[in-house]
Amino acid sequence: MKRIASRDNALFKSLRKLAQHGQARRNAGMSLLEGVHLCEAYLQWQGLPRQALFDTRRLEGERASAEVRALREQVPQDLQVWLDGNLIDDLEQVQAGQGVVFVIDTPAPPMPERVTESCVLLDRIQDPGNVGSILRTCAAAGVRRVFLSEETAFAWSPKVLRSGQGAHFSLAIHERVDLGALLERLAVPLAATTLDDAVDLYQVPLPRQAAWVFGNEGQGVRADLQAAAAWRVRIPQEPAAESLNVAAAAAVCLFEQRRRYLAD
Amino acid sequence: MKRIASRDNALFKSLRKLAQHGQARRNAGMSLLEGVHLCEAYLQWQGLPRQALFDTRRLEGERASAEVRALREQVPQDLQVWLDGNLIDDLEQVQAGQGVVFVIDTPAPPMPERVTESCVLLDRIQDPGNVGSILRTCAAAGVRRVFLSEETAFAWSPKVLRSGQGAHFSLAIHERVDLGALLERLAVPLAATTLDDAVDLYQVPLPRQAAWVFGNEGQGVRADLQAAAAWRVRIPQEPAAESLNVAAAAAVCLFEQRRRYLAD
């Protein structure tokens, strides 16, 4: 176990750089997980982190937390780094965090040659909360693979991780994907949500396996992907209402597909 | 039309106070709507604002915006306030906003004696993005009335307004409601989403009119409301997965109810 008491410590400086700069994390191929829930989920789905950082005050003394102590016991000593004083504050994005941060290798699953099962494509979805919510919906609906376009929020950013609540670890997440080029690899039909020239979701003959594409909050799914879709699907809503938020629309579509095959 | 050129102007000072302090807006019974889309939606659903604030630079000269000019033409002169220089920056929460802000009376619909149509109850939902997304889902699903508990994010805050995308204006939104006391006024059955001791959403005999309660992001629906529910409903998901985000769960439930009666 390492213990750090000073901001001048070299290891601490490198951790702070990772915590504060998305580009540094990307260059290093590493991500940071904050809080008990995400770290627990990582242990459950993926195994041990590269390093586990603990606020010493949450392990010992008056402010010790039973949850954080229980988490520490699942991590071998040589992966533990204890941070004294308020050093952890420099590493947590959440104010008054829980005092535990895992450093992990960002999962980078290989691109499949052929996609033969249900998957989700995210076309320039920019709000981190939306991306995290959709990842969570995918995991709950049984969709195991997600492709994110270049301009979609970075899945392993702190906000998307927080919103995803651990869903990341049960999914294969492919980032910065050229969705146009991906179409050739899809062995399942493509369904796009759109408001124009579309079939009612509840009328469309959804197969058990499909690729769903959900699009940018303002502009929707890009035209070439809409054109390539086997189905253009519309969620039937009140005539004068605003369209659904994209994460809500994804939940409605993926669970409608799930509903149809649950009895099988 | 009023035109303001200085931060020392008394009207500007009072507007800045409203913009920067939620408590000031609540005390005054007023809210601020930012951006073309929200202001357009207000004009469409509710009518004229109390005042319409415009960034002069978006109305005249090189940086003028056709959208903002078109909006201005819908507002009588005597309700317009033009703000010179960068004064508007003090009033917009969004960085680099669109240069239009409406000051409105916060709608405060009277509490119905009896609730005889579908409605939604929000029990301590804290994330503004979730509250806004649920309001949007309600409007799209045809639910017209929403009750927010004391600890739920304030519906007329800038973040919830932004996330709601104008859904607010087609709904009756009741805030700071004692949900326990509300139960006596419900003439429609109560459905609560929960993971324990619950019936599969797709098996439960949902009526056309129901009251849905959705609960806190971490703790779910409060125990007394669960106990009072005619149905405790569970969205059937992958066994090991995290539960859905609450706004995604609300979308799945409300659109499942809508699906069943669409053909009628």
Image: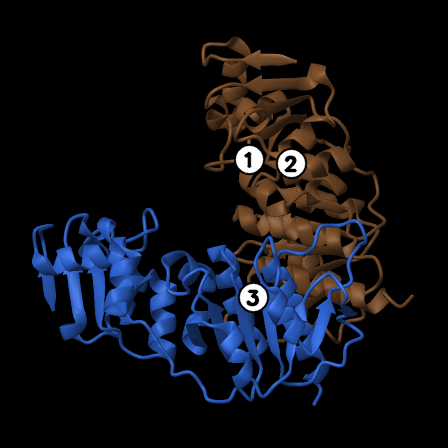
Chain colours: A brown, B blue
User: In which quadrant is the C terminus of chain A drawn?
Assistant: bottom right
The percent position of residue A161, horizontal first and vertical second, equals 60, 40
| Element under disc 2 | helix
Give the number of the disc on residue A98. Answer: 1
Is the residue under label 1 in contact with that under label 2 (CB below 8 Å)?
A: yes
Going from N to C along the chain, the mark reached first, 1 or 3, is: 1
- Where residue B29 sits, quadrant-wise, is bottom left
**Three-letter amino acid code of the residue under disc 2:** Glu
The residue tagged 3 is: A244
Whether residue B244 is visible:
yes
Give the residue at x 19% y 59%.
B15
Q: Which mark is nearer the camera, 1 or 3?
A: 1
Between residue B163 and residue A115, name the one nearer to us.
B163
Mark 2 Cα-neighbour bin, 10 Å: few <14, some 14–19, many ≥20: some
Q: Is residue A224 above or below residue B70?
A: above
Give the side of residue B146 with respect to residue A211, left or right. left
- What element does badge 3 sit on? loop
